[in-house]
Image: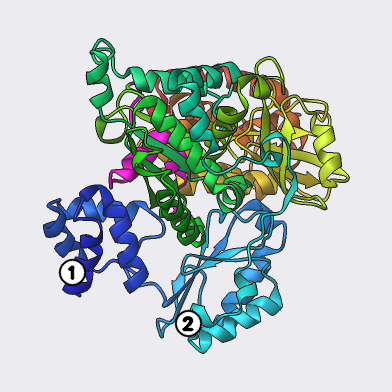
Amino acid sequence: MKKIIYGFSKKYDHKPTHLLQILRAIQSYYHYVPEEAIEQLSELLCIPRTRIISVVEFYSFLHLTPRGQFELLISDSITDHMLGKIELTSYLANQLNVAIGGVREDGVVSLDNTSCTGLCDQGPAGLVNGYPLTHLDRPRIDCISNLINQQKPLSEWPSELFQVTDNLIKPGLLLDSTIAIGDALKITFKRGLQETLAEINQSGLRGRGGAGYSTGWKWHLCYEGAEEEAFCDIDTQKQLQRYVICNADEGEPGTFKDRVLLNSYAHQVFEGMTVCAAIIGATQGFLYLRGEYLFLYDKLQAILDERLQMGLLGNNILDKGFDFDIEICLGAGAYICGEESALIESLEGKPGIPRNRPPYPVTQGYLGKPTVINNVETFLAAAAIAVNGGEWFANIGTEKSKGTKILSISGDCLRPGIYEYPFGTSIQAILKDCGALDVLGIQIGGPSGTFISNQEFERKLAFEDLATGGSFIIFNKSRNILDVVHNFTHFFAHESCGFCTPCRVGTSLLKKQVDKIVEGHGSAGDVVALEELCQIIKKHSHCGLGQTAANPVLTTLERYPELYQSKLKTISYEPGFDLDGALESARRMANRNDAGAHLAQIGEDHD
């Protein structure tokens, strides 16, 4: 074992920053992280064993106890539930004689759920040893079960089991345009770096991850650096280390656009990163790739190698004296790492716990240095703007939302897949394009976003109306909205990083409270307590996960109060219950400051 562990560590020059990558390799080889490996890594990386254990325990794809030789994970996303996931998982467990969440006695196979696989357009889906399984049904499960029982290596499995398609249905401004490899960089240098930054600013490009921060201004702040660095002479400025990070950790259920962009537009994404690096003076970039997209790793690495051979990466790019390289780092099943500061912590080989802000990454990011973090779609758009100019992009969209938005559409529609629309497009037009009929509502922006009813389809796709990182899940009238809320609250409780009490305790209490009501055991006071709890979690949580974890309850309670009321127990001696009045009272009560004490009280009263 020592020789193998040493080899994994040596590949990354025994750098503690690459602890997660080393642990991923160990997990893949042994199907867990043995105690002996932890002891050896502690010595090789010169870090405490407690830090290594904390990383293993934080990421859901790493384990301290053995998993099966074949590690099966089935997506628990709401879209998979809509396609019969629960029944299929039970059937799979029976076929393999393994308990869900367990390891078979012979150690050959383990089976468990995972939050989302980024395959919502081709589910039910899962992973086997990190690789995707799509369109699961009984015949495919029979085939998989036979292959596992025969202990056939994955290399001998039928390729159609692993087939992932782009499902690019409606390309637009970005996905229809053809940009020759290297053109964005060549035009950037010809135009000038600051002039290209001016084009990015003129375009009105805002971050496509959902928050919508100005891309050009973020790049400017990173180049300017911390306040004391802003007054350095220009030569000193150029010597300051800066980093570029592409956030490809799209863990929001219902989102899969980055998977398609990296599969079919990776050159353009990498070019956008390189343009950014040239402008801000960075020499190192990272693509943080969600662990569920392991199947893309080799292809992306080959593209980086190709770009190196073409003189578009490495030293003296295009003979301009500009050095820049990109490294791919894989996540390991932690939704919270989509938050930029948690992602940086993960890149540094730590648990992905969000940092206190300020300072922001543009001044103190990776290893404490100025860092730009943008998502895949943002870098794709930046490369196109570098070629076509800011006006080309700004002419599309609305006053506050320039350009287009790429959507991942799934759920109850005839044509799930990738669609690109100008900002300002109505929800009704989108539903027509994807073949959605008899629609009850839509979850826009994933569980952390907004649920809209069928009375709101004239609303617009825009930062000033309905902002989204890309997730667009459609529910028809056969669906039970409370089933959706139930799934989403369980998702947040599972994915909470545990750092702060309002989120750690609050999401667990929220899950229990929703379960109680959905199962028909709730009383009138439980709905009041539910919204109280939602407001406390929203107002007092440390990061965006907790601040949005209550959205599934709040947005559906606002639109469908009668659904919640229909689940309440009927108590003969209780007078008629005014739900709206009770909720208004709860809203006022939720303004109290002592969040921790009130969470504890709710837990005692309604556990």
* Residue 482 visible, this orientation: yes
Q: Is residue 527 magenta?
A: no
Please give the residue where the numbered disc 2 appears in the rendered image: 153
- Which quarter of the figure has residue 489? top right
Q: Amino acid at mark 1?
A: Glu
Q: CA distance from mark 1 to mark 2?
A: 26 Å
Seen in the image, is 461 located left or right of residue 359?
A: right
Residue found 49% across the figure and 28% down from its top: 188
The foreground one among 342 and 221 is: 221
Is 335 part of what is drawn in magenta?
yes
For the N terminus, the quadrant is: bottom left
Magenta segment, which residues?
A: 333-358
Q: Is residue 350 left or right of residue 471?
A: left
Q: Nearer the viewer, residue 496 or 124?
A: 124
Q: Farthest residue toward the top?
A: 231
Tell me where residue 570 appears, x and y as whole percent: 73, 41
Name the residue tied to disc 1: 36
Does 505 appear above or below 18? above
Local secondary structure at mark 1: helix
The residue carrying pointer 2 sits among few (fewer than 14), some (14 to 19) or many (20 or more) residues within 10 Å by Cα, namely: few
Residue type of the residue flagged with mark 2: Pro
Q: Position of residue 109 (x, y in %)?
A: 46, 78
Task: Name which residue lies at 58% across and 24% down.
Answer: 205
Secondary structure beneath disc 2? loop
Q: In terms of depth relative to the viewer, which is nearer, 101 or 465?
A: 465
- Residue 212 at what x, y percent from top left? 56, 25
> How busy is the neighbourhood of tag 1: few (under 14 within 10 Å), some, or many (20 plus)?
few
